[in-house]
Image (cartoon, rainbow, N blue to C red):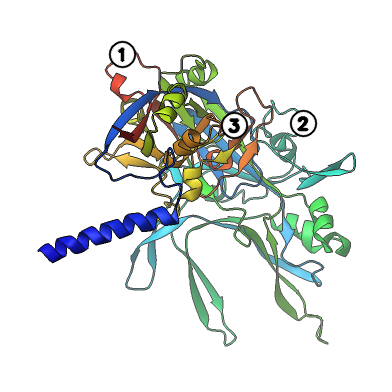
């Protein structure tokens, strides 16, 4: 026993020496954990200033995901999301040949889904992911040729700038481009006969089965995961593509000026409930139009011989999500009349063209000199946001929120330094230390809190007087990996940019803010900064 104890003491001393030699700043203000009998761990809570900020029309091109559909949110109101995209040929200057007939023109866009069962015959049962609203919801879906020539950039005064498109550019309040008004002047391209393709479209979770012939003439069955499949107007694509002058199909720039793209418009389908899906239109080869046709065989003496041919048109290039937000009265008033002096009682976070929360660590800032002079060391710092479960009980809840440096539109250091991997099958659920992941009640299965760690952020402010105690922004996020921002069409005195991951999400949540009366039953749930220190005796 004596030898074991002695060895432990030697190892402890060696560890301390090693840590000191490796990091001379270990005992710097705000850094490290000091395991010493002269120090005790204590918690401090600081008041913060937190208030709502409305997101006005915001840049919506360049998103990795785009919504399509109508989402009736009982808390926030109704969001209608249309979509517009350029198109490009998979191969330019194609040899079209002499067309004898168009067999099919099919638009396909995969859904996010997962397999729930594999059946004895090899077929699979799927469930759709990223669908919001009634699972049996139907939509009136119309696909038009876009009449607006979209661009990725423009030149002004000899300098090149990125071309921006905004969430409100298919409504009358847009001051320049209205995709809806322009496209609707043309013919509808999707099937007018089958109601499942237009008036009663729905996002189906059914597996698709394609049967083709091999070289020997035998049937070959291919099973395809759920996707949107629309039969498009054969006559339109015969004239627009297959009979086009060869010069129009010679290059991307020429083709995109000639065929300006597709515009997807959704409306309510009678009295049917509605829903919305997040789709990946941007991934190469994901969203495409396949034209299958027959053409006279070139190398033959038989003038009646034909061959099967196809041309693929990809939905690539400039794209934009187009949103119409019809806000509920309570939500609309809350984000339009924020109390930027005393803070708000409730914080409304809503994706799309929605709202975010602004957080100022004013109580902590007022104590900085004391913390520095008394050499308090930060062990951990958190913001814990309590969900207003009573008002959120009937609504979808976002899995995650994202806290960032609002003044500079950058991640805080705790986000950047967190290399932790996902603890679930969802690859997006990484950075679990920084977190922002919803905590769910074991019985009700409803959200209770979101906790975000900002330990390193607080340490940096303490130990370096030149580091600014910046305002923080809090948004819902559709993808924690996406940290870039989109520009507001008209910036204001609070924000000029919004995280794109928030623009991609249709969801929202209500959190308890900082300005809750002490007599209120929810006073203990008010937002505060919690910091754990080791303090010298």
Asked if one can make out residue 424 in the rendered structure from this viewpoint, the answer is: no
Whether pointer 3 and pointer 1 mark residues with C-beta atoms closer than 8 Å, the reply is: no
- State the separation of the CA atoms marked 2 and 1: 49 Å
The picture quadrant where one finds residue 489 is top right
Left or right: 414, with 300 as reference point: left
**Label 1: which residue?**
518
Q: Residue drawn 57% across and 84% down?
A: 217
Q: Earlier along the polypeptide chain: callout 2 or callout 3? A: 2
Name the quadrant of the C terminus: top left
Mark 2 or 1, closer to the camera: 1
Q: Secondary structure at mark 3?
A: loop
Report the residue that reaches farthest toward the left.
1
Q: Which percent across, then down, holds residue 324?
A: 59, 31
Q: Residue drawn 66% across and 37% down?
A: 59
Q: Secondary structure at mark 2?
A: loop
Asked if one can make out residue 304 in the rendered structure from this viewpoint, the answer is: yes
Q: Of the numbered discs in the image, which one, if any, rests on residue 176?
A: 2
- Whether 401 is drawn above or below 45: the answer is below
Q: Could you say which is closer to the camera, residue 321 or residue 536? A: 536
Q: Residue drawn 73% across and 67% down?
A: 101
Name the quadrant of the N terminus: bottom left
- Whether 236 is drawn above or below 397: the answer is below
**Label 3: which residue?**
407
Whether pointer 2 and pointer 3 mark residues with C-beta atoms closer than 8 Å, the reply is: no
- Whether 100 is drawn above or below 369: the answer is below
Q: Could you say which is closer to the camera, residue 487 or residue 397? A: 487
């Amino acid at each position: 026993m004596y030898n074991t104890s002695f060895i432990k003491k030697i190892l402890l001393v060696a560890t301390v020496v090693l840590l000191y030699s490796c990091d001379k700043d270990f005992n710097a203000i705000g850094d490290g954990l000091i395991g010493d009998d002269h120090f005790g761990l204590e918690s401090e809570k600081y008041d913060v200033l937190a208030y709502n900020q409305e997101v006005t029309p915001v840049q919506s091109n360049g998103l990795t995901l785009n919504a399509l559909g109508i989402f009736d949110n009982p808390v926030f109101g109704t969001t209608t999301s249309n979509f517009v995209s350029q198109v490009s040929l998979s191969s330019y200057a194609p040899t079209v040949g002499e067309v004898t007939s168009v067999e099919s023109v099919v638009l396909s866009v995969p859904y996010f889904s997962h397999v729930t069962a594999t059946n004895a015959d090899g077929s699979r049962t799927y469930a759709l992911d990223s669908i919001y609203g009634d699972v049996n919801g139907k939509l009136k879906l119309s696909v038009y040729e876009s009449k607006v020539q979209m661009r990725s950039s423009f030149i002004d005064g000899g300098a090149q700038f990125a071309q921006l498109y905004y969430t409100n550019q298919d409504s009358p309040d847009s001051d320049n481009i209205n995709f809806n008004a322009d496209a609707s002047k043309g013919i509808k391209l999707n099937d007018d006969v089958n109601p499942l393709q237009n008036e009663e479209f729905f996002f189906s979770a059914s597996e698709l089965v394609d049967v083709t012939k091999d070289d020997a003439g035998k049937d070959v069955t291919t099973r395809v995961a759920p996707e949107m499949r629309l039969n498009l107007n054969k006559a339109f694509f015969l004239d627009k593509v297959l009979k086009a002058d060869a010069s129009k199909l010679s290059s991307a720039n020429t083709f995109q000026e000639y065929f300006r793209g597709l515009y997807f418009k959704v409306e309510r389908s009678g009295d049917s409930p509605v829903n919305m899906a997040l789709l990946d239109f941007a991934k190469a080869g994901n969203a495409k139009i396949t034209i299958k046709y027959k053409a006279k065989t070139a190398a033959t003496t038989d003038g009646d011989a034909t061959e099967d041919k196809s041309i693929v048109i990809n939905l690539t290039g400039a794209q934009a999500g187009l949103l119409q937000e019809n806000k509920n009265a309570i939500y609309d008033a809350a984000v339009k009349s924020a109390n930027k002096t005393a803070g708000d009682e409730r914080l409304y976070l809503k994706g799309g063209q929605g709202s975010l929360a602004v957080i100022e660590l004013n109580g902590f800032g007022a104590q900085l000199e004391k913390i520095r002079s008394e050499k308090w060391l930060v062990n951990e710092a958190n913001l814990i946001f309590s969900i207003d479960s009573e008002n959120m009980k009937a609504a979808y809840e976002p899995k995650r929120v994202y806290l960032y440096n609002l003044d500079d539109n950058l991640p805080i250091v705790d986000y950047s330094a967190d290399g932790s991997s996902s603890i679930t099958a969802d690859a997006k659920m990484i950075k679990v230390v920084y977190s922002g992941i919803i905590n769910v009640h074991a019985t009700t299965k409803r959200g209770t809190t979101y906790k975000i760690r900002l330990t390193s952020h607080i340490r940096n402010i303490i130990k370096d007087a030149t580091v600014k105690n910046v305002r923080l922004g809090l948004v819902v996020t559709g993808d924690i990996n996406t940290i870039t921002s989109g520009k507001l069409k008209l910036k204001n005195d609070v924000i000029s940019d919004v995280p794109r991951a928030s623009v991609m999400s249709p969801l929202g949540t209500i959190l308890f803010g900082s300005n809750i009366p002490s007599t209120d039953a929810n006073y203990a749930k008010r937002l505060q900064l919690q910091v754990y220190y080791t303090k010298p005796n």
